[in-house]
Image: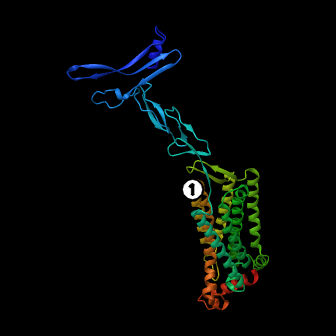
């Protein structure tokens, strides 16, 4: 209508006015033209349009004013999409994509929300995202926290039991000092999982991975030292003087500082080259900004984890070699089984860890730390605690001597147990 009025305006009559007429039909073909409105284009007033809807008489089948376009207007939250091959006034209304909005009618394009905001359900307003992380207050964080605290207390109780019964053969066997070191390390392993829970910051992000790597290195190198102790005590092929020197000098104990030093060097290189830092994930959960720790260098993280697996493999190999030796207080079978569980946990960890995002990824690492620590605590120390607390008659040299063995096994058990209990400790 505007274009037609302007054409007339540019012609002969610049101040022309026009009437809007409606034909009223009467019976027998009679009709009457009735003025229902007008429009005009004055030089000073612009376009003037008026219409009285009450005076309009519609033909049968019409109940409202016809639309001048072939499509309804697109309300906020939608954008116009032209229909191919049709007039410009013909279009479809397409909803805005995620994180995009349109807050006006008939918008041609949607507007993307900032990274810190998200689109509401109507897609007509950007809302501020809330900050989220694995918190102590939510059920998942609370469950992991309670589990870590309970097992750390349980580890402390086992350590007290071992110290109280330190003069018994089962505590002295397989190097008493190594058992204490392993229990203390497991105690801190359980507590270290708490570093992953709560709002991350630069310090906690650095401590998470380095503490995890160093503590588990101490634990696995202790298991390796215990396995080597069993092999030296029961299956030594070197002269007796060499065995005596290895026992008295506590040579297996040097495995712990050497292995830990190697892991410490790896962690220092990691922190110098590409240390972990806090990061924000704005896409994994709608309406939330997930604060997580970015490990920095994935190569360094896999190096730390690979070194732990190599220690576990060495411990399993040594324990496997001594699994069939005389079984009087010989924990080689339990050591090998605990290393198998450790492998299963961390081999399963990697694919699950990289297939998850946000808080679930953090919870997965905490679960793996707790599961592997529980395996070491339960499989190595639970059988010993059973004998100490429930079967004390087996926790003596007298009970050992009355066990049914062949003469050769009796001789091996007495000699080797005395080597472990007297010379190692």
Tell me residue 351's x, y (percent): 57, 56
Left or right: 5 as drawn, with respect to 188: left
Left or right: 373 as drawn, with respect to 243: left
Tell me residue 71's x, y (percent): 41, 30
Q: How many marks?
A: 1
Q: Which residue is mark 1?
A: 351
Q: Can I make out residue 275 in this image?
A: yes
Residue placed most toward the observer, 310 or 242: 310
**Residue at the image point whose x is 50% and y is 16% from the top:** 42
Q: Which quarter of the rendering shows the N terminus?
A: top left
Determine the residue located farthest toward the top in the rendered image.
Answer: 12
Q: Which quarter of the rendering shows the C terminus?
A: bottom right
Q: Can I make out residue 320 in this image?
A: no
Residue placed most toward the observer, 420 or 278: 278
Q: Which quadrant holds residue 186?
A: bottom right
Q: Which quadrant holds residue 49?
A: top left
Residue placed most toward the observer, 64 or 305: 64
Q: Is residue 336 above or below residue 161?
A: above
Q: Which quadrant holds residue 260?
A: bottom right
Q: How is the image coloured?
A: rainbow
**Residue at the image point whose x is 50% and y is 38% from the top:** 76
Q: Is residue 26 above or below residue 346?
A: above
Determine the residue located farthest toward the left in the rendered image.
Answer: 28
Q: Specify few, some or many for label 1: CA neighbours under 10 Å numbering under 14, 14-19, or 20 or more.
A: few
Tell me residue 257's x, y (percent): 77, 67
Q: Is residue 97 above or below residue 278?
A: above
**Disc 1 secondary structure class:** helix
Tell me residue 271's x, y (percent): 75, 54
């Amino acid at each position: 209508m505007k274009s037609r009025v302007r054409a007339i305006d540019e012609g002969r009559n610049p101040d022309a006015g026009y009437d809007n007429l409606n034909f009223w039909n009467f019976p027998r073909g009679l009709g009457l033209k009735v003025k229902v409105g007008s429009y005009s284009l004055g030089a000073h007033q612009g376009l003037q349009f008026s219409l009285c809807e009450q005076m309009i008489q519609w033909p049968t089948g019409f109940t409202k004013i016809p639309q001048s376009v072939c499509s309804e207007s697109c309300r906020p939250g939608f954008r116009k999409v032209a229909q191919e091959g049709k007039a410009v006034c013909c279009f479809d209304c397409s909803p805005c994509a995620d994180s995009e909005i349109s807050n006006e009618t008939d918008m041609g394009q949607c507007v993307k929300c900032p990274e810190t905001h998200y689109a509401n359900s109507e897609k007509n307003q950007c809302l501020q995202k809330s900050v989220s992380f694995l918190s102590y207050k939510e059920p998942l964080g609370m469950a992991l926290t309670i589990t870590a605290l309970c097992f750390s207390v349980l580890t402390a109780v086992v350590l007290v039991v071992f110290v109280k019964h330190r003069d018994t053969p089962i505590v002295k066997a397989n190097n008493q000092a190594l058992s204490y070191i392993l229990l203390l390390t497991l105690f801190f392993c359980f507590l270290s999982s708490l570093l992953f829970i709560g709002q991350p910051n630069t310090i906690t992000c650095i401590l998470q991975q380095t503490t995890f790597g160093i503590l588990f290195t101490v634990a696995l190198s202790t298991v390796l030292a215990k396995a080597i102790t069993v092999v030296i005590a029961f299956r030594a092929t070197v002269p007796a003087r060499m065995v005596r020197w290895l026992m008295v000098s506590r040579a297996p104990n040097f495995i712990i500082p050497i292995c830990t030093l190697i892991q410490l060097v790896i962690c220092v290189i990691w922190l110098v080259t590409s240390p972990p830092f806090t990061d924000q994930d704005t896409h994994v959960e709608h309406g939330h900004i997930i604060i997580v720790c970015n490990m920095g260098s994935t190569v360094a993280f896999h190096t730390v984890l690979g070194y732990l697996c190599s220690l576990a493999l060495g411990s399993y190999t040594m324990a496997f070699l001594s699994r069939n030796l005389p079984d009087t207080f010989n924990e080689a079978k339990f050591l090998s089984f605990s290393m198998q569980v450790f492998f299963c946990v961390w081999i399963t960890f990697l694919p699950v860890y990289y297939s998850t995002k946000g808080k679930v990824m953090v919870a997965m690492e905490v679960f793996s730390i707790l599961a592997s620590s529980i395996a070491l605590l339960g499989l190595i120390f639970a059988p010993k605690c059973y004998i100490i607390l429930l079967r004390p008659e087996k926790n003596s040299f007298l009970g050992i001597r009355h066990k049914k063995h062949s003469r050769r096994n009796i001789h091996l058990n007495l000699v080797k147990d005395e080597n472990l209990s007297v010379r190692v400790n």
